[in-house]
């Protein structure tokens, strides 16, 4: 039901009549308004009937305002009601348009921009911001108490594996000033060939105390608002957490550039790292080929890892890539031809890899070393191990990982 009903006994404020109707008498104005609201005459006909010089759509805007029994909350003045259009009266959302004649406050307008409301909104905004700041200070204090350990690690505690992956972590995530480990989500390059492994490494280095969250500079929104307070591991900033008589920058340089002789003097452990990295590359390449052929990501389990582990005894990573390429192509053809499920087709690719490898050995196939695709995110750890530490270059990818290769590298470095 409409909130407005026109009648001639309304308390009209005649001094508010619009300029286009000011020359008319009050009685004539009442006739016009009665035709407009009660007689439902077409507005164009009303304008024509009274010979008015006004556009029909603007007629109601020149009607006088009505005095209401409401007062302005800011200055106590009687609020005025603007006469509505006939269309507005029919609307389900119609409400009286109340306005203060002095400060222009409109209590029926939720977006009132009178100077008093603007001041009120600004004060409320400042109050909310201040409350947020106080809440953030309280939250930050809790974060500092939880995630700012007093104990520090020693470089001497780092294993050979730790040194390799720490160097990769710093290459991929260190800030330009070398003082922070920036959020993983903003990385310049992957740390390893596998995204899941990158995140596990962050967790591992945090758990061992080699790095810690920068509780003062990490975005507060990276931490949960509810307790126990958790955080997004890929979005917080980290710091080195070593107890050494070194500046942060000097510490970075030592960790970022591990010495080759330590790796070449521990050939068995270095071989394990080489093979581990090669397996990760094979899994990454497998998923790269699956993605090209519109397969979903394949979750490599123990069976797949065991397959690549055994193949590395006989083939280089590059040659395993060639086996993967052919096997995934065959799996896609199998799915198209026989209509098998995606999971079955993907599992068949692993079966094909084993089958093709066995035939390659039995029939003495001449397999090519397939290169790492330029758009496959292989992780900077491969460059660090193959190029910086072992000085293998492409041999890291194109030769079978073996003690003999490492002994050859060590022999050349000794000379």
Image: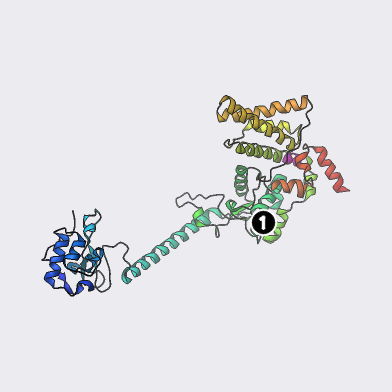
| x and y percentages locating residue 68 in the rendered image | 17, 67
| x and y percentages locating residue 6 in the rendered image | 14, 62
Left or right: where does residue 180 sit relative to residue 19? right
Does 337 appear above or below 382?
above
> What residue does disc 1 label?
243
| x and y percentages locating residue 138 in the rendered image | 46, 59
At 67% from the left edge and 30% from the top edge, which residue is drawn? 327
Residue 323 part of the magenta segment: no
Q: Quadrant of residue 51?
A: bottom left
Between 334 and 31, which is closer to the camera in this rendering? 31
Q: Is residue 13 visible?
A: yes
Stretch in magenta: 268-274
| x and y percentages locating residue 104 in the rendered image | 27, 71
At 81% from the left edge and 41% from the top edge, which residue is drawn? 406
The secondary structure making up most of the magenta span is helix
Between 65 and 228, which is closer to the camera in this rendering? 65
Q: Residues within 10 Å of mark 1 (few under 14, many from 20)?
A: few
Does 51 appear above or below 208?
below
At 75% from the left edge and 27% from the top edge, which residue is drawn? 360
At 68% from the left edge and 47% from the top edge, which residue is drawn? 165
Left or right: where does residue 52 sit relative to residue 230? left
Left or right: where does residue 98 sit relative to residue 313? left
């Amino acid at each position: 039901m409409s909130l407005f009903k026109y009648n001639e006994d309304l308390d009209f404020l005649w001094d508010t009549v619009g300029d286009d109707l000011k020359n008319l008498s009050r009685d004539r104005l009442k006739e016009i308004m009665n035709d407009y609201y009660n007689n439902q005459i077409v507005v164009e006909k009303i304008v024509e009937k009274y010979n008015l010089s006004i556009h029909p759509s603007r007629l109601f805007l020149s009607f006088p305002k009505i005095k209401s029994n409401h007062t302005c909350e800011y200055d106590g003045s009687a609020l005025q009601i603007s006469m509505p259009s006939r269309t507005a009266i029919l609307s389900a959302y119609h409400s009286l348009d109340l306005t203060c004649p002095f400060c222009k406050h409109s209590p029926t307008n939720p977006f009132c921009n009178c100077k008093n409301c603007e001041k009120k909104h600004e004060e409320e905004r400042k109050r909310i911001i201040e409350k947020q700041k106080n809440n953030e200070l309280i939250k930050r204090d809790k974060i500092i108490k939880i995630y700012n350990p007093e104990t520090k690690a020693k470089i001497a505690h780092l294993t050979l594996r730790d040194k390799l992956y720490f160097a990769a972590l710093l290459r991929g995530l260190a800030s330009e000033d070398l003082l922070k480990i920036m959020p993983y989500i903003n990385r310049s390059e992957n740390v390893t060939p596998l995204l899941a492994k990158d995140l596990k490494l962050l967790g591992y280095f945090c758990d061992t105390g080699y790095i810690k969250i920068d509780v003062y500079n990490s975005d507060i929104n990276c931490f949960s608002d509810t307790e126990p307070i958790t955080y997004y591991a890929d979005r917080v900033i980290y710091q080195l957490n070593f107890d050494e008589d070194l500046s942060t920058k000097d510490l970075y340089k030592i960790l970022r550039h591990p010495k080759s002789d330590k790796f070449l003097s521990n050939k068995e452990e270095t071989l394990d790292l080489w093979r581990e990295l090669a397996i990760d590359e094979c899994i990454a390449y497998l998923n790269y080929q699956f993605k090209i052929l519109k397969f979903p990501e394949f979750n490599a389990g123990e069976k797949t890892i065991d397959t690549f582990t055994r193949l590395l005894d006989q083939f280089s990573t590059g040659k395993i890539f060639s086996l993967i390429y052919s096997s995934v192509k065959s799996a896609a053809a199998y799915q198209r031809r026989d209509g098998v499920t995606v999971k079955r087709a993907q599992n068949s690719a692993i079966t094909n890899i084993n089958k093709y490898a066995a035939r390659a050995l039995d029939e003495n196939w001449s397999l090519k070393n397939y290169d790492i695709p330029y758009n496959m995110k292989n992780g900077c750890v491969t460059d660090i191990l193959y190029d910086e530490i072992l000085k293998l270059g492409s041999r890291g990818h194109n030769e079978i990982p073996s003690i003999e290769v490492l002994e050859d590298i060590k022999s050349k470095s000794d000379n």
